[in-house]
Structure formats: structure tokens, C-alpha cells
Image (spheres, grey):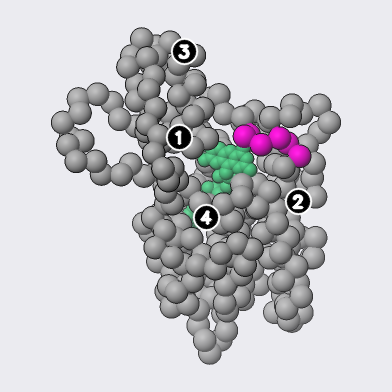
Amino acid sequence: MELAVLIIGAGPAGLATAACLSQHSIPYLIVEREDCSASLWRNRTYDRLKLHLAKEFCALPYMPYPPNTPTYVPRAEFVKYLDRYIEHFDIQPRFCTAVESAAYDVPSKRWAVLARDTVSGAEVRYGATYLVVATGENGEGRIPAIPGQESFSGEAIHSTMYKSGRAHAGQRVLVVGSGNSGMEIAYDLASHGADTSIVIRSPVFKGVSKIAGNKVTFERTTKHMLNNDGFPKKGYPDHWKGEDGLYFAGFARRGLAGITMDAKNIASDIAYFADPVSV
Ligand SMILES: Cc1cc2nc3c(=O)[nH]c(=O)nc-3n(C[C@H](O)[C@H](O)[C@H](O)COP(=O)(O)OP(=O)(O)OC[C@H]3O[C@@H](n4cnc5c(N)ncnc54)[C@H](O)[C@@H]3O)c2cc1C
């Protein structure tokens, strides 16, 4: 299928980019490996989660939260907001489509993208003038290998699998990592009656090893556009634009506010440079 713009990932960054492209009347296709949009927020977050920043800093482009929304938006309300966003901008992601590779073809000046239908297993090929990678900074939950880990007889889970402290009342629990999630999960455990400890070290944050899980291999140009952690090599505020029509949405390490900026920048850039014939 030949496209003007292909967006990989229907999380907040992909959805925001789609909405911004619509404002410029630029056609696009958005593909998502899961069977739903915003899979992180629907399936891989804990019950207590609220947005960590006030709602003013967490709205996607062109759609504020309704006036009665709490300052710190609970997860379920954020998911509802995203559903309204999708409906409002008529975004129709192609679900169950996992991108496996993308290579820039110099003669045709187009991206050749190979994806897989995760239900049928069939290969799907796309050609696109512009490619927007919106696969998320927190692609895969990663538990680092710790020597002697196999001798631990208790349960060890990643925060993406954690739902509530209810199941841990009366247990001794160690939370490893003290970012927003680690802190909030420790609080949730303690308030449900778990004997909770938390490990804090400096530097606290460590990036994910790959931006899109272990299935995605970006050939040629992307090799030198991404660092070993799978983040764009160009630092903020230039991180969003690669070469040959390649863009990165949601890799500013600035949450939803960063996503909004990336989406607007990308859509304006494509609108500015787009050949009216190819879009
Ligand atoms: C627990 C938690 C709380 C957070 N709270 C806040 C907050 O309060 N405020 C704030 O501003 N930010 C917050 N963030 C940070 C950030 O806003 C979120 O991570 C946000 O979901 C990022 O959106 P995204 O679209 O970039 O990535 P994601 O939400 O991860 O979406 C990426 C999408 O791409 C899909 N995908 C990945 N690989 C492929 C592939 N190969 N082919 C097709 N699809 C693919 C994934 O399935 C996913 O649906 C939080 C993050 C976490 C983890």
C-alpha cells in the first residue's frame, strides 16, 4: 500500500501526530501492533495511577480536558479522553499490525516498511514518503539481570504487570527504582498494608534498550540516528526530525507536553515540505 505518511504506534504520540496531520489535511495511516489504541494506558498500568502532572500540561493538541476533570487525571479518565480524541479526529488505526523493519529506498525516495498482521501472521508491506516513529519511550518492560536472581524464591514482576497492592497485604515487598511509577507503587503497596521498602540509586533513570521491542530493525539511516538506548541521537529540541522524511514522536523525555510539541512540529514540517502531488 502506498502512503504519504505512515505513523507507527497508536499511543498518545501517534494519535497526536495523526490529529495534527488532519489539521493540515495530510492523509496518513496509523498502524498499531496491539488490538487497541493507547495499549500502555489500557493494559500495562496500575489501578492507582493518575497523570503525574496537572491536566493543563497533559492535553493533546487541539483538545483540552472538559472543565470538570480533576487536576490530576485518573487513568480511566485519561483513557476516556483518548477515546474522545480518537472519535473527534476520526482516527482509525490499523490494529494488530506490528512493524518489523523499515528501510529508506534512495532511488524512489520512499520508506519501504515491512509489517506483520499479528492475527493471521501475514506479511504486510507499505511504502511511505514520510515515516513517523511513535513507538514509545517505554516500549518493553525490562528487568535487568541481577546476579543470583534465580535463587530468589518470591515473585518478581515488572511495574507494567503491577495492578494493585491489594494482593500484597501483609507481604514484604521491595520496589526497585524510584521514578514516578516506583514511588507511586511503593505508596500503593504501603497503603494496602504491605511491608514496603524501596531501592533508590543515582542516576535513577535508565533508558530502554530498544525503542520498539526486539522485533524492529531500522536499517541504513536510522542506524546512526538512534543511540544504543533506542532514542534519537539528536538531543532535545531537535530530536523529532531525522533524515529522509523520518520523524520521531514522543522521545523528548518530556511526557505528554513533549508529545504535543513533537506532533505539531512534525505535522507542520511535513505540510511545509510536502509535495502536493505525493500527499
Ligand atoms: C506509568 C506511566 C505514567 C505516566 N504518567 C505521565 C504523566 O502523568 N504525564 C505525562 O506527561 N507523561 C506520563 N507518562 C509518560 C508518557 O506520557 C507516556 O508513556 C505516554 O503513553 C507516551 O506515549 P507514546 O505514544 O509516546 O508511547 P506509548 O504510550 O508507549 O505508545 C506506543 C505505541 O506504539 C505501539 N508500538 C510499539 N512498537 C510497535 C511496532 N513495532 N509496530 C506497531 N506498533 C508499535 C505500542 O503498542 C503502543 O501502543 C507516563 C508513563 C508511564 C509508563
- What residue would you read off at disc 1? 178
- What residue would you read off at disc 3? 192
Viewer-proximal residue, 7 or 268? Answer: 268
Q: Is 192 in the magenta? A: no
Q: CA distance from mark 4 to mark 2?
A: 18 Å
Identify which amino acid the numbered label 3 is placed on.
Answer: His
Helix, strand or loop at disc 1? Answer: loop
Q: CA distance from mark 3 to mark 4?
A: 34 Å
Quarter of the picture containing the N terminus is bottom right
Q: CA distance from mark 1 to mark 2?
A: 30 Å
- What residue would you read off at disc 2? 61
User: In the rendered structure, which disc, 3 or 2, sits on the residue that comes first in sequence?
Assistant: 2
Instruction: Check contact, mark 1 vs mark 4: CB within 8 A.
Output: no
Identify which amino acid the numbered label 2 is placed on.
Answer: Pro
User: In the rendered structure, which disc, 1 or 2, sits on the residue that comes first in sequence?
Assistant: 2
3 vs 1, front mark: 1
Quarter of the picture containing the C terminus is bottom right
3 vs 4, front mark: 3
- Tell me where the magenta segment starts and ends, as one range: 51-56
Q: Could you say which disc has been placed on residue 135 in the image?
A: 4
3 vs 2, front mark: 3
